[in-house]
Every structure is written in C-alpha cells, then in structure tokens.
Amino acid sequence: MFEFRLPDLGEGIHEGEILKWFAAVGDIIKEDDPLVEVETDKAAVTIPSPRGGRIVSQNGNVGDTIKVGDVIAVFADGEAVVAEAPPVAPAAPKVEAPREVPVPKPAPEVRKRPVPAAPATRRLAREKGVDINLVTPTGPAGRITPEDVLRSLEMEKAPKEFVAPVAKAVAAEEEQKEREALAEFAAHAASVIPFLEIEPLPDFSQWGPVEKEALRSIRRKVARKMVTSMVLVPHVSHMDEADVTLLDEFRHREKERRKGQVGGHLTLLAFIIKAVTAGLKATPAFNASLDPFKEEIIFKKYYNIGIAVDTGRGLIVPVIKDTDRKSILHISTEIETLSNKAREGTLEVSELRGGTFTITNVGPLGGSALIPTINYPEVAILGVGRAQPKPVVREGQIVIRTMLPLTLTFDHRIADGADAARFVTEMARQLSDPNLLLLEA
C-alpha cells in the first residue's frame, strides 16, 4: 500500500478543508489526474494524484479539515499501471500456443517515487521538460518548489560533478534560513501587550436561539491577519475626492467601442491601479514593508497591486503583478480573470502572493466611503467608494460632477500625513484627466 500525505501547499499553510473528492474508494485513477480539492486559508487548491492506481481508502469527508503531512488517501500496490493501460483491442480468433513453448511474463514496471509538489509546480516541470521525480526539493517538508524545478533545469547544463554539491549547498542554505527565522520568532514570542485581557464570551443562548458555525479556512485567515494588522500597525487615514467626470465619460465611450474585445470590460479600477502605480513610484514609502525585529524598511522596486474580491468564502486578495509594465487594457483583463477565479475558488497560490499594495473597492456594493485595514505586511491600502454625481464649486459656479471618494490608510511608523496628502492629491489630479493619466502612467 502507498500512503499519500497532504503535501505542503505553500508558505504558512498548515491545514486545509476538503471541498470535493474527484475519485471514490475503489476507483482507478491516472497519475496527475485531479484527486481532491482542498480549501486553505489562502485559496482552493486542486491536488493531483501522485500515481496511477486503485484508491483503497480516503481520509476525510467533504467539510473535514486535514493537516499537512496527514494521510489523505491510500493506493493499492501493484495497480499503478492499470489506469494507464491502453484500450483492449477487439478479440481475435484464439490460437493455441504449442505446449512446449512457455509464455514469458511481462517485466514488472518500475514506478516513479511520488513527490510532494503543488499542481502549478508539476505543470511547470512538464512545460520545461523536467522530470519532477529527479528534482532535489528545498521546500518545507521535502516539498518541490517552482524554484527547484528551474534550478534543476539549469543544473542539467552544468558539469555533472558539480550538480550534487550545489544541490546539497542550496538545501543546507534553505534549512539554515528556516532555523534562523524560527529562532528569531521564538526570541520575540514572549512579548505581550500590557493591559490586554480577553474574557470568554457569555452563553448567548440564555437569551434566545443561536446558531454556531466554525471559523474556517479563508475567513479564519482574514480574522488573523486583521487582528495582526490592527494590533501591530498604527493606522492613519487620509481622505479626499477625485473628480472623475471626464475619465468616466472616456471609459464609457471606450467600453462601448471595445465591447467583446479583450480588456473591453473597462472599470474605474483599472485606471485607479495605473494611477496608484504612478503614485507608488513617486512615494516609495507606501510600496514598502517594515521589519520590526531588524528595525529596517524594505523598499520594493516592483509594483504588484492586490485587489480585494468579495466571495462567498470571505475576502480574497489576488495580485496583479508588474502593473508598471502593463497597459490599462491588460490590467482590465487581469482584473476580470482574477476576480472570476477568486469567486470560483480556482486561484493558484502564486496568484495570491507578492503584493506590495492593496486596493479595496466598495463602490459597486454601495457606500460613500470606507476606512480600510492595512493588508499586513504591506504598509498602505487604498479604499475606494462609489463614484456618483455631486454638486461642487468650479470657478465660483455650482456644477454637477462625478466624484470618487478615496481613503489612503497607511502605517504611521514609516510615513507621515504630508506624504499621504501628496500621494492622494497626485492620484486625484491624474484621475481627473484621462489624457494626463495615460500620459504620465
């Protein structure tokens, strides 16, 4: 019997909730076919079968939580090739072989060892022509990472005598980094917040009927991140409005003209992302992270903008990478694609990582404005309200303009109110004129 354990699905993920089994006990499955869908605190992930064969048992039903490293399915030995067998040809007339000639038995198949790797990593290995079974893992719990696959590809070009030493050195370096990180965490784990005392909740059922629901997966992760952010980061918010009358008119014209084309579903968010990117270039402090242990600010020289998406499972923040190098149409396409994947629960873990700044847009849902919570360890977040017609004064006259509420919440440890004012004022200036936005962004 071969026991398949839940592999490491990404940094900081320790367990997952079973959403769907793609095969039942007794079924024969092929290697890399979908086996089970698991929802972690970051996204829903489809885990492929590590080998072909018959499933003899499964650990957990839909809705159960299973930890990384626990046995999730058991495969029968000796049946790995059954699922891969070619279709049986039509039966031919039976010809009896001479009794004195023995029929040789087929040689036993040498099966590849199963390796823990995410679906995206397996796909990368197939695309690069790398045998994932021969890749040296450096991830936690022996997990193969995308970097391991690419490193293996490079090593194929290196002299054979240097491959093994390099692989061992890389693995040792990764282990050392992990030990140092754990030691650093342990050194500061004893710190507490003075006067903080959380009392147990009363029994609410004594006053009326109640219903209880376990805090799981994504909703639990959101709860933890929000508490961490609000306790650790001193939040300050700066509010302003942008006159998007001309931009909205331009957007509607282009949306109608590009109907049915790629990127044609233009929303204000695509333009806001471009304006934010320009603002981050001018104000690097908002595209950074603060390491409180090392007491240093990490300025990021890349621009990956997260967009908060409301789903039935909680708030998910997919990330649009390299927004400084993408057109508004390209960004518009990614907004639609990532939002749909977030609601369907099909995001890759890699599509949720690497963000440097987050935008949360409640405009489509209603509400004039909001004060958002920073998506830690980022240091700033932009809250966008609903764009709507309002009376404003222009050159001494009261006119109706489409105004967009903006709220920048930032970490007061690394930036001041003057920085926020300049950032939001520049954003409002660019959003007020589509020609200026397209020119400068």
Image: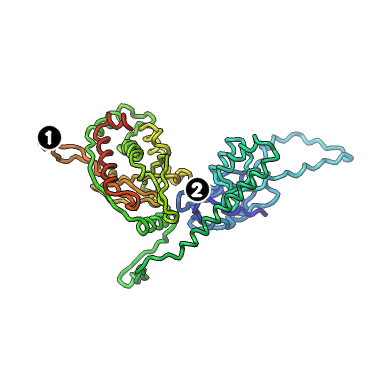
Q: Which mark is residue 417?
A: none
Residue type at numbered disc 2: Val
Mark nearer the N terminus (2 vs 1): 2
Q: Residue at x 36, y 59 (%)?
A: 231
Q: x%, y% of residue 16?
A: 50, 55
36 relative to 404, above or below = below
Is 247 in front, or is 426?
Answer: 426
Tag 2 secondary structure: strand
Q: Residue furthest left?
A: 396
Q: Is residue 204 in sight in this rendering? A: yes
Q: Residue at x 29, y 52 (%)?
A: 236
Is 262 in front, or is 107?
Answer: 262
Residue type at numbered disc 1: Glu
User: Image quarter for residue 341?
Assistant: top left
**Residue annotated with mark 2:** 45
Residue 56 in the figure: left or right of residue 376 = right
Gap in angstroms between the C-alphas marked 2 and 1: 56 Å
